[in-house]
Image (cartoon, coloured by chain):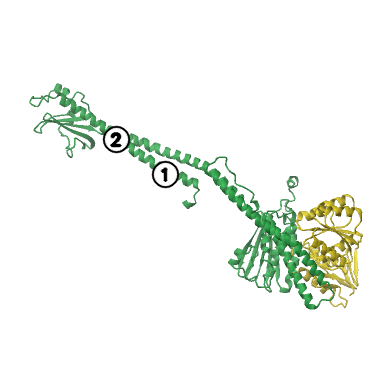
């Protein structure tokens, strides 16, 4: 997987390069908009991580040109201000996702993975991990032959986690995606919901499916 | 009403009218006195003339005078008129002649040795004069009624004219005062429109170069300096928050990378996790400061869209119920349905959640949280109350201050940075609403948020005009 990172702040660019390489991506880093545009037009990347504030050509204008030329490479926008207008404008111009600085590397990786998967056109109405199945149409959740009743929020949470088995999701990510809370709620809301899910899904089972990842977040996976 | 609280133009008008009233009275008294004196002087001159004619026509004392002859009398008193009376006494003090209308009354005695004086006769005030020449004494008496009549005429005129003049002064004075103070009223209105969010507004400076224009100019220059320092302060917070983002991202990234290392000892891992957690806290503070500095600069961007506040709260209620369950706190909600407001859903959710979170955080085991949303005089009123240790009045006064945390919150392990309520207030204000501590008893704390009802109200779907207006 080849990722183009366009970021002019050396330290953040270095962090992205290091973090993405660790996760097995091939990374190319550019520090200005004009070079990045030429590079993105010449060579197909699997995804672009794009800072909005750039010397030369800014991220939004770069994105606009790419989409005008029908280049559909998934784009993850990095915004410094996290202002509503920038966010909305970016998404309107065809960005696939955005992250406000300061961000967590794990979150960048998680979101990139989601973008790449979406780009491959993967669409399911049925998720299965080990003996846990959820049906997106009937909204039925089964653990082996045991039917599990979930509230709407609990269902949204398990669905989000099951979309990519083994992928770690941070609390912020979960809050934003499942609850649409784009702020620090100052409570352990996610932890409380995870506990409830565990009670309903994992209690009394030998194989635990919901895992906590060292202070970072949660993931669902079938085997160690 | 306390006179100190009267508008300046009323005080000015009243003082002017009072002064004019005093002046009018003094002028009136002076004029009346002067006219009276003039009248009396005229009488005195008249009486002196009578005496001069009398003594001029009178032969020397050795020559006898026939006082009974009308010819003699008419020669002695050629201009005899009914307006004055005369009496002639001989050298021995015997009355030789007196005006016929005097009968035998005799003239009243004069007080003192003065030539002219006053006397009362037949109940009337008279002017009396005594002359002495050629061995004869002449006394002349004149009625004062003409003089008194002039005086009372004047007073009558005055009693009519003075109130009219006073009324004119009052109305005119009020008009002038109002005109002079109109620019001041405009200044007040303009000054009240200038708030932290509109520091760039200035007072109108009238084209004249009078005190008002100098006042406006002076105030505007003060505002310039104020705006400059305020902008500096806001800018500083915004810049500082912004500049902190890059190092924070790097710190966080490196901590996460360090946590992924395979050979961490449990102690190292715990330390790194603690650092990561603190970094996240710092990130949240920076984000909040940036939001507040944006609000101060009037640049809090609010995307105005119709939001159903009732549905939003119902959704939050579900979360809060789950969060409250371990402490056995019960939630009592009474939410209006279709509570439409025009606003930013993210911000409104944040405002509501902050309040609910506080209600949960500062609660007690087995306590209650009350949420009500209802329409009240054209606005939505959201009340969030909770049981638990109450807020002292001292705490209540500072609750919305930045970084303020009450004694009960400090050291209680309840977390928070003391920015939540400031943010709530900025959000409410950005939506044209307000937030206040509405109840603070020892066992119940309640916050009240008012928000304007959305214009495209769902409650009145029959109004087609709303759709046209957009």
Residue B267 in percent (x, y) is at: 78, 78
Residue B376 in percent (x, y) is at: 65, 56
Q: Colour of chain B?
A: green
Residue A198 in percent (x, y) is at: 82, 73
Q: Tag 1, which chain? A: B
Q: Which of A107 and B107 is in front in this view?
A: A107
Q: Taking A137 as reference, is B173 left or right?
A: left
Q: Name the residue under label 1.
A: B18
Mark 2 residue crowding within 10 angstroms, few (<14) / some (14–19) / many (20+): some
Circles 2, 1 touching at the beta carbon (< 8 Å)? no
Q: State whether residue B91 is above or below residue A215.
A: above
> Residue drawn 18% across and 37% down?
B114
Q: Quadrant of residue B309?
A: bottom right
Mark-to-mark CA distance, 2 and 1: 27 Å
Label 1 element class: helix
Q: Quadrant of residue A122?
A: bottom right
Mark 1 residue crowding within 10 angstroms, few (<14) / some (14–19) / many (20+): some
Dot 2 or dot 1, earlier in sequence: 1
Q: Taking B45 as reference, is B208 left or right?
A: right
Q: Which of A159 and B286 is in front in this view?
A: B286
Residue B82 in percent (x, y) is at: 22, 28
Q: Colour of chain A?
A: yellow
Query: Residue B431 — which label?
Result: none
Label 2 element class: helix
> Residue drawn 16% across and 22% down?
B75
Q: Tag 2, which chain? A: B
Q: Name the residue under label 2.
A: B36
């Amino acid at each position: 997987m080849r990722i183009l990172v366009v970021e002019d702040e050396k330290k953040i660019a270095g962090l992205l390069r290091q973090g993405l390489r660790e996760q097995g991506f091939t990374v190319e880093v550019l520090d200005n908009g004009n070079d990045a545009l030429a590079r993105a037009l010449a060579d197909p990347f699997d995804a672009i991580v794009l800072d909005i504030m750039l010397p030369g050509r800014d991220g939004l204008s770069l994105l606009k040109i790419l989409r005008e030329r029908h280049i559909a490479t998934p784009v993850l926008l990095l915004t410094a201000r996290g202002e509503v207008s920038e966010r909305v404008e970016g998404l309107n111009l065809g960005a696939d996702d955005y992250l406000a600085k300061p961000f967590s590397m794990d979150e960048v990786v998680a979101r990139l993975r989601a973008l790449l998967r979406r780009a491959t056109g993967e669409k399911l109405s049925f998720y299965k991990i080990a003996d846990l199945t959820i049906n997106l149409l009937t909204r039925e959740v089964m653990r082996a032959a045991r039917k599990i009743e979930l509230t709407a929020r609990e269902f949204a949470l398990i669905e989000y986690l099951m979309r990519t088995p083994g992928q770690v999701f941070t609390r912020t990510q979960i809050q934003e995606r499942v609850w649409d809370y784009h702020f620090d709620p100052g409570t352990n809301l996610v932890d409380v919901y995870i506990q409830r899910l565990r009670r309903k899904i994992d209690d009394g089972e030998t194989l635990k499916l919901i895992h906590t990842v060292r202070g970072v977040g949660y993931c669902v996976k079938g085997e160690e | 009403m306390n006179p100190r609280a009267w508008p300046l133009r009323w005080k000015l008008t009243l003082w002017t009218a009072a002064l004019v009233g005093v002046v009018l009275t003094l002028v009136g008294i002076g004029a009346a006195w002067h006219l009276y004196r003039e009248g009396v002087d005229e009488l005195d001159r008249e009486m002196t003339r009578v005496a001069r004619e009398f003594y001029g026509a009178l032969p020397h004392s050795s020559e006898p005078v026939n006082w009974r002859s009308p010819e003699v009398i008419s020669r002695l008193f050629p201009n005899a008129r009914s307006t004055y009376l005369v009496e002639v006494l001989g050298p021995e003090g015997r009355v030789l002649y007196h005006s016929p209308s005097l009968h035998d009354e005799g003239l009243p005695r004069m007080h003192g040795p003065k030539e002219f004086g006053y006397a009362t006769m037949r109940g009337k005030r008279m002017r009396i004069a005594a002359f002495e020449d050629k061995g004869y004494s002449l006394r002349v008496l004149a009625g004062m009624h003409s003089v008194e009549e002039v005086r009372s005429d004047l007073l009558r005129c005055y009693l009519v004219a003075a109130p009219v003049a006073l009324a004119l002064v009052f109305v005119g004075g009020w008009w002038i005062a109002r005109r002079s103070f109109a620019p001041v009223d405009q200044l007040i209105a303009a000054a009240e429109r200038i708030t932290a969010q509109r520091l760039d507004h200035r007072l109108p400076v009238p084209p004249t170069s009078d005190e008002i224009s100098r006042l406006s100019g002076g105030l505007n220059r003060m505002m310039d300096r104020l705006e400059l320092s305020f902008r500096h302060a806001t800018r500083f917070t915004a810049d500082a928050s912004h500049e902190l983002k890059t190092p924070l991202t790097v710190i966080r990234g490196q901590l996460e990378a360090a946590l992924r290392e395979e050979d961490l000892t449990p102690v190292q891992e715990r330390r790194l996790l603690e650092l990561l957690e603190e970094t996240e806290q710092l990130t949240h503070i920076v984000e909040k400061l940036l939001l507040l500095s944006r609000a101060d600069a009037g640049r809090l961007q609010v995307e105005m869209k119709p939001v159903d506040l009732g549905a939003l709260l119902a959704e939050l209620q579900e979360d809060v119920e789950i969060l409250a369950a371990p402490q056995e706190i019960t939630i009592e909600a009474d939410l209006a349905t279709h509570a439409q407001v025009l606003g930013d859903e993210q911000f409104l959710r944040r405002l509501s959640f902050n309040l609910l979170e506080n209600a949960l955080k500062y609660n007690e085991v087995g306590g209650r949280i009350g949420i009500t949303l209802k329409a009240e005089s054209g606005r939505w009123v959201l009340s969030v109350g909770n049981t638990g240790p109450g807020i002292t009045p001292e705490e209540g006064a500072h609750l919305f201050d930045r970084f303020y945390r009450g004694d009960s919150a400090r050291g209680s392990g309840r977390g928070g940075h003391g920015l939540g309520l400031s943010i709530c207030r900025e959000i409410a204000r950005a939506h044209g609403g307000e937030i206040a501590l509405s109840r603070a008893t020892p066992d119940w704390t309640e916050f009240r948020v008012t928000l304007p009802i959305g214009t495209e109200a769902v409650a009145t779907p029959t109004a087609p005009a709303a759709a046209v207006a957009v």
